[in-house]
């Protein structure tokens, strides 16, 4: 009879340890936030919409900056008056100007 309370205590300690590990994992992976989003699909759609707008804006700004740097470097190369590259850039500029409707 003396061993039974000891075994129950050991089972309870093991169960408490498992519950604490599970609690740490749930906090670590933000399970509550995931369930909150899944239980309110309207909020999930709204957050994904905002994320899409932010990505699109970031792509537009990034492409603008990269293009500006590229065109600046291209203009510097063209000003060096290198024979092969200058002819290619001049032809490219001429083609672009032909396509502009003015």
Image (cartoon, rainbow, N blue to C red):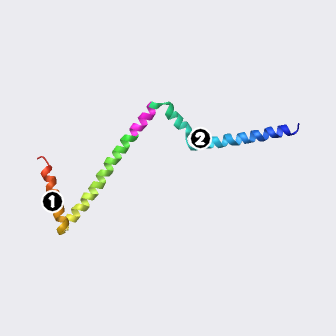
Distance between mark 2 and mark 1 Cα atoms: 62 Å
SS for dot 2: helix
Left/right of residue 70 with respect to residue 99 in the rendered view: right
Rendered image: mark on residue 21: none
Question: Which residue, given by chain and number where applicable, does mark 1 sit on?
Answer: 91
Determine the residue positioned at 14% across, 49% down.
Answer: 100
Q: Position of residue 48 (x, y in %)?
A: 41, 38
Q: Which of the 4 image quarters holds residue 52?
A: top left
Count the marks: how many? Answer: 2
Nearest the eye: 6 or 50: 6
Tag nearer the camera, 2 or 1:
1
The vertical placement of 58 against 80, above or below, is above
The quadrant of the rendering that contains the N terminus is top right
Residue lying furthest right in this view?
1
What secondary structure is the stretch in magenta mostly built from? helix
Which range of residues does the magenta coloring cover? 42-50
Q: Position of residue 6 (x, y in %)?
A: 83, 40
Q: Position of residue 67 (x, y in %)?
A: 27, 54
Determine the residue positioned at 16% across, 57% down.
Answer: 93
Question: Which residue, given by chain and number where applicable, does mark 2 sit on?
Answer: 26
SS for dot 1: helix
Left/right of residue 66 with respect to residue 49 in the rendered view: left
Determine the residue positioned at 59% across, 42% down.
Answer: 27
């Amino acid at each position: 009879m003396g061993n039974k309370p000891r075994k129950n205590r050991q089972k309870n300690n093991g169960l408490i340890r498992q519950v604490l590990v599970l609690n740490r994992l749930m906090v670590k992976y933000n399970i509550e936030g995931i369930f909150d989003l899944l239980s309110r699909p309207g909020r999930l759609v709204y957050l994904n919409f905002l994320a899409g707008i932010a990505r699109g804006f970031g792509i537009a700004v990034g492409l603008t900056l990269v293009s500006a740097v590229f065109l600046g470097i291209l203009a510097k190369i063209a000003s060096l008056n290198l024979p092969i590259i200058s002819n290619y850039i001049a032809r490219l500029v001429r083609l672009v100007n032909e396509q502009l409707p003015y």
